[in-house]
Amino acid sequence: MESKTPKSIVILGGSYGGISAAHYLLKHAIPKLPSPQDYRIVLVSTSNEILCRPACPRAMIADDLLPQDKLFVSIPSVFEQYPSQNIQFEHATAEKVDHEARTVLIRSAGDGSEKTIQYYALIIATGASTASPLLSLNKDSTFIRSQWGIFREKMKTAVSIVIAGGGPAGIEAAGELGEYLNGQAGWFSCKQENPKVRITVVTSAAQILPALRSSIAEKAEGYLARVGVTVIKNTKVTGVSPSESGTEITLATDTKVTLSDGQELDADIYIPAMGMTPNTAFLDATLLTGDGRVDTNPTTLRVDKAGVRVYAVGDVGSYAKPAVHAILNAIPVLGANIKRDLLLDAGTSEASLGPEREYKEDTRETQMVPIGRSKGVGAAMGFQLPSFLIWAIKGRDYWLWTTGGLWSGKQWNKES
């Protein structure tokens, strides 16, 4: 008897959004379909390991600061619990999506061979990349480990570090480096007058951490001063020489940093930590917003312009500001709407399914920023949090205490 070709639900991206979506569908959607064996999740990821990306500001400094077995986790291993016919992992990069023909062209990370997959449904969860290869899994886990190695060698002799960007990544990197290299100021000092390594944060904004109220930002600046970090505000980095300093091309090159006020800073290490670039180069421009993210329906999480059963989740989507908590809030909505779409196409009556789920972005002030290994600032749902709570929730291990349940799928055991 001729075997039937499974309907492929292709998920592009193997981080928070992609891994969570795969678990949710494997637990709550595919088993509820009339013929579960006819559906297959195809998870495509440039890395065969998941990285807890928020931990990069500490993880880049030394391996012994965080448990490596929790920092990096094998993707194939977390899906061994499901029927093999329902899950397929591709260690590959998405090269092109043809949303008219409903195909994805992928390139293998192993031998570089190309393969075209016909998709029945598509979830775009490719996230975004940082300018600095230290702060994100821009390629695979082998690559980021090699970049950390280069950085650590340079750090041994560095006496000046310049970080461009006053958002969480830049401030966390400055705090971690400051405490590791300079230690904390004495009990009766509010700052270090002569730090061993001069660390400078440059931001074009009027305050660091602009997503938080000014009083919290000022508190953060005080904590930074205690570990030898100086902040320059209302000033842009207008040029660096060499021009590709801080990137994977010239990661550990001595750099001259030119500022908009005419200053020039000499940096043994330069870390560009300004913003992120959505990983959407493989998509047709008609599917993107002006900032390069996927044009995503803000309530259903569908990509309406791409045809039926196409969705986006995570930092790559336009439905919310990039944040881990926004991704986790979106997964139940995404999963419910995909399940509904699959059941409808399988012949289930719409009347029996009820209304589709709607996503609503939580715009309350929520951001937690550790500064070194004992301090931190932030707020949750509009309420300012004390430093010890920032340490307890995030600063201890940068969320590694939460990722075990997330990567294994236990967080999605209940259909919420």
Image (cartoon, rainbow, N blue to C red):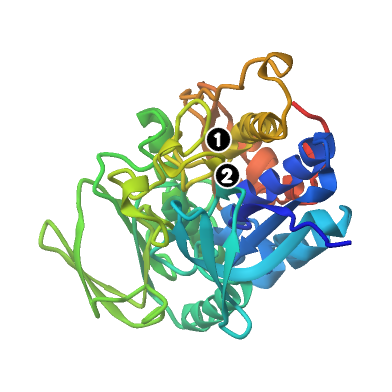
- Residue nearer the viewer, 382 or 36: 36
Task: Report the quarter where the N terminus lies.
Answer: bottom right
Q: Residue at x 64, y 56 (%)?
A: 52
Q: Which mark is residue 375?
A: 2
- In the image, 80: left or right of 286? right
* Amino acid at pointer 2: Lys
Residues 84 and 408: in front is 84
Q: Quadrant of the C terminus?
A: top right
Q: Is residue 167 left or right of residue 400?
A: left
Q: Position of residue 295 (x, y in %)?
A: 39, 40
The image shows residue 132 at horizontal and vertical percentages of 42, 67
Q: Which residue is mark 1?
A: 326
**Residue at left 35%, top 30%?**
214
Drawn side of residue 336 relative to residue 315, left or right: right
Horizontal side of 154 relative to 148 (left or right) equals left
User: In the displayed structure, would residue 341 be above or below residue 400?
Assistant: above
Q: Nearer the viewer, residue 149 or 105?
A: 105
Instruction: Identify the amino acid type marked 1.
Output: Ala
| Outermost residue, front side | 1
Mark yes or no: residue 6 visible: yes
User: Crowding near pointer 1: few (<14 within 10 Å), some, many (20+)?
Assistant: many
Q: Position of residue 242 (x, y in %)?
A: 24, 80
Residue pictured at 51% horizontal, 35% vertical:
302
For numbered disc 2, what is the local secondary structure? strand
